[in-house]
Image (spheres, rainbow, N blue to C red):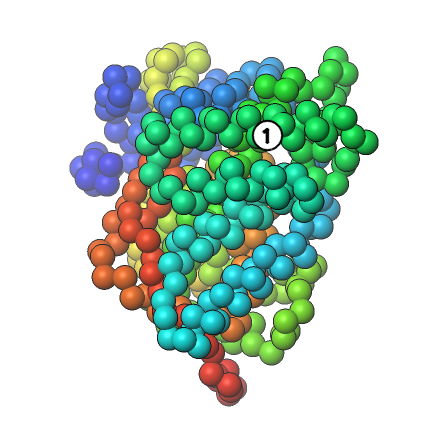
């Protein structure tokens, strides 16, 4: 794709998986497909290929089913609901910090990719199932997500079998008092505003599987890339530490604390720019349309790549360079609104964006205050560009304790 953009510019036509497709890296085309004329574009080939995993969940569904499900699921993602997760998220990250500090004291290495994956999976499962018996019953079944890095058909079949323990939890819940303290409880209690009907058991299972997939690998991959970038850019790592130094000891930060840490947010934003987990989105035209001067016949696939938009040399000076100051206040006033779209855009943007940002920032604040991570992996950096943009090789790093008085004098 990179070679084709260099050869043909911001849009080119190709045959991909047997279908005619336009591939674009210009935000003007992206905003037309994702925002202005989004109703003409259903989900495309890539998402349809994961339908085996997720059934007809929110990520895959279309039309009236999608609208109904989005309305019923939305209350679980209100900012007040997500903000209540700050303390559990912090507690899970302090557990990880203790593990990495012990490795630092023993001068051993840690597998950042695997450890962050397990941490994010814990957060997602507690968000869905709460912190009681249901979580402890379900968590061992979902360990396959962080234990098996492949995304083979064998993995897909193992993942679909997770519907059985989810169904067991749903059946047990229905015999109890209604519970509205976790996402599963909210989804079970949700009613369609037109029919007053709840979700079917099959739809509940599909939506839970969708939330796990959408909320786990994307955030874990983004955090792994963030640590890789910080390990390669000591000035940014030091500047991040200076913002965090002296703020807390071991107390848990709250969601209200987070907006004050501007540079931490800039680091995350720049990591999302360079390595967006959702690096490629596909849509399929339902009716004839135009992208600028280009005619789009019904049935044409449109490939929109946040990875290439977010590295477009016209939009981003020195686009491959890691520079969190790109996101300093006032810097982006002239930037196209879709020059950044790591969580997509328009009505079908990621419903879990606020949760993902909360997880990422709390993790970085808790760990980077105490540790720096030095990359010791020797493999070259290679992409595993599947549905999500992952590193082909795990990031193995040596954690190092921040020395006393490490903060620069000003």
Q: Is residue 300 above or below residue 35?
A: above
- Can residue 273 be seen in this snapshot? no
Where does residue 91 sit, x and y in percent of width and height? 62, 59
The image position of residue 346, as x and y in percent, is 54, 32
- 329 over 222 or under it: above or below: below
Residue for point 54% across, 26% down: 163
At horizontal 68% and vertical 57% (from top left) the residue drawn is 87
Q: Quadrant of residue 135?
A: top right
373 displayed left or right of 190: left
- Residue 402 versus residue 92: which sits nearer the camera? 92
What residue do we see at 56% from left, 42% from top?
A: 139
Q: Position of residue 47 (x, y in %)?
A: 42, 26
How many numbered marks, from 0 up?
Answer: 1
In the image, taking residue 282 as reference, residue 16 lies left or right, namely left
Give the class, few, some or many, for how many residues have Cα within 10 Å of label 1's Cα (few <14, many ≥20). many
Q: Residue furthest right?
A: 177
Q: Quadrant of the N terminus?
A: top left
Q: Which residue is mark 1?
A: 166
The residue at the point 41 percent across, 75 percent down is 106
Taking the image as drawn, is residue 100 in sight? yes
- Disc 1 element: helix
Residue 368 at x, y = what percent? 50, 68
**Residue closest to the eye, 138 or 385:** 138
Along the line of sight, the residue nearer the viewer: 337 or 110: 110
């Amino acid at each position: 794709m990179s070679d084709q953009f260099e050869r043909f510019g911001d849009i080119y036509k190709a045959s991909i998986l047997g279908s005619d497709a336009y591939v674009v890296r210009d935000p003007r085309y992206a905003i037309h497909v994702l925002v202005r004329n989004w109703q003409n574009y259903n989900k495309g080939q890539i998402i349809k290929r994961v339908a085996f995993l997720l059934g007809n969940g929110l990520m895959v569904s279309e039309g009236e089913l999608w609208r109904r499900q989005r309305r019923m699921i939305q209350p679980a993602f209100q900012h007040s609901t997500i903000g209540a997760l700050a303390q559990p998220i912090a507690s899970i990250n302090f557990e990880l910090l203790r593990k990495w500090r012990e490795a630092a004291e023993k001068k051993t290495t840690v597998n950042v990719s695997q450890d962050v994956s397990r941490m994010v999976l814990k957060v997602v499962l507690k968000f869905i199932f709460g912190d009681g018996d249901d979580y402890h019953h379900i968590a061992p079944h979902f360990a396959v997500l962080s234990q098996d890095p492949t995304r083979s058909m064998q993995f897909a079949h193992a993942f679909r079998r997770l519907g059985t323990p989810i169904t067991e939890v749903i059946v047990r819940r229905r015999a109890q008092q209604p519970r509205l303290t976790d996402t599963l409880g909210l989804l079970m209690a949700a009613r369609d505003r037109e029919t007053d009907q709840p979700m079917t058991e099959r739809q509940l299972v599909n939506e839970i599987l969708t939330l796990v997939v959408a909320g786990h690998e994307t955030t874990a991959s983004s955090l792994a890339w963030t640590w890789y970038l910080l390990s390669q850019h000591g000035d940014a790592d030091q500047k991040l530490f200076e913002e965090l130094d002296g703020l807390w000891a071991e107390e848990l930060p709250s969601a209200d604390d987070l907006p004050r840490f501007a540079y931490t947010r800039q680091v995350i934003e720049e990591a999302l720019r360079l390595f967006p987990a959702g690096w490629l989105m596909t849509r399929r035209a339902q009716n004839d349309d135009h992208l600028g001067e280009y005619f789009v016949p019904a049935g044409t696939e449109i490939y929109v790549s946040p990875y290439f938009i977010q590295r477009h040399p016209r939009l981003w000076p020195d686009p491959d360079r890691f520079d969190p100051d790109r996101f300093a206040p006032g810097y982006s006033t002239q930037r196209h609104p879709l020059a950044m779209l790591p969580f997509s855009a328009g009505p079908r943007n990621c419903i879990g964006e606020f949760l993902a940002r909360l997880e990422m920032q709390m993790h970085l604040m808790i760990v980077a205050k105490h540790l720096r991570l030095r990359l010791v992996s020797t493999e070259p950096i290679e992409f595993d560009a599947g549905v999500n943009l992952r590193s082909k090789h795990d990031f193995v790093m040596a954690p190092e304790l921040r020395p006393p008085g490490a903060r620069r004098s000003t």
